Amino acid sequence: MNNEKRLSADAVKIIVGLIILVTGMVLWFVPGADMVIIVWVIGIIMLAYGVIATIVVVRKKDGSKPVLPIVCAVFGALLLVFCTFIGHTVLPFVIGAWMIVMGVLDLLGAQKTEGNLRKILGIASLVLGIIVLICLFAVKDTLATAAIICMLVFGVVAIVDFFAVRKTTK
């Protein structure tokens, strides 16, 4: 994988890590927070990232098309518009499924490298995904605390992993 694609994948990974960390912090510090608030946080972050990345790509004037940043901005705006529906019906399932897939991919990627950090990230992601999916059908209070802790751990580990990978590729 060339450096440009690696940087793009790392950028997505740190954005996801930040989103999950912020979501975990919101849930930790505002225990009664509704999923709609989480959708708002994610929507604002995605919209801001999309707009900023679009401006950066357009200013480069190297012929690149800002397709992904525009899609990200549009998706962020849609999250803000349909926050209630998404927050109460779609988001919990999507987060759980996404975290399980990310966990499996991280564990598979850790086999190719000697990265213990990547293994921790994969395990944290798997645990978080399973807990989130269980929370869809179980009592929220006990499992929600575990999910919040997993979100915080995953977010921090993803950010640390981003900087560790970046440091080794320089």
Image (spheres, helix red, strand yellow):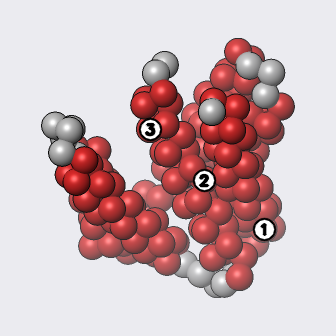
Mark 2 lies on a secondary structure that is: helix
Residue 129: % across, % down: 65, 46
* Residue found 83% across the figure and 31% down from its top: 116
Mark 3 lies on a secondary structure that is: helix
Residue 61: % across, % down: 18, 45
Residue 22: % across, % down: 61, 68
* Residue found 16% across the figure and 37% down from its top: 63
Indicate the amino acid at tag 2.
Gly
Instruction: Name the disc covering residue 145, or none.
Output: 1
Indicate the amino acid at tag 3.
Ser
Indicate the amino acid at tag 1.
Thr
Q: Nearer the viewer, residue 104 or 66?
A: 66
* 1 or 3: tag closer to the N-terminus: 3
* 2 or 1: tag closer to the N-terminus: 2
Residue 28: % across, % down: 72, 76
In the picture provided, is 6 more to the left or to the right than 167?
left
Which residue matches tag 3? Answer: 8
Mark 1 lies on a secondary structure that is: helix
For marks 1 and 3, give the CA distance. Answer: 32 Å
Which residue matches tag 2? Answer: 17
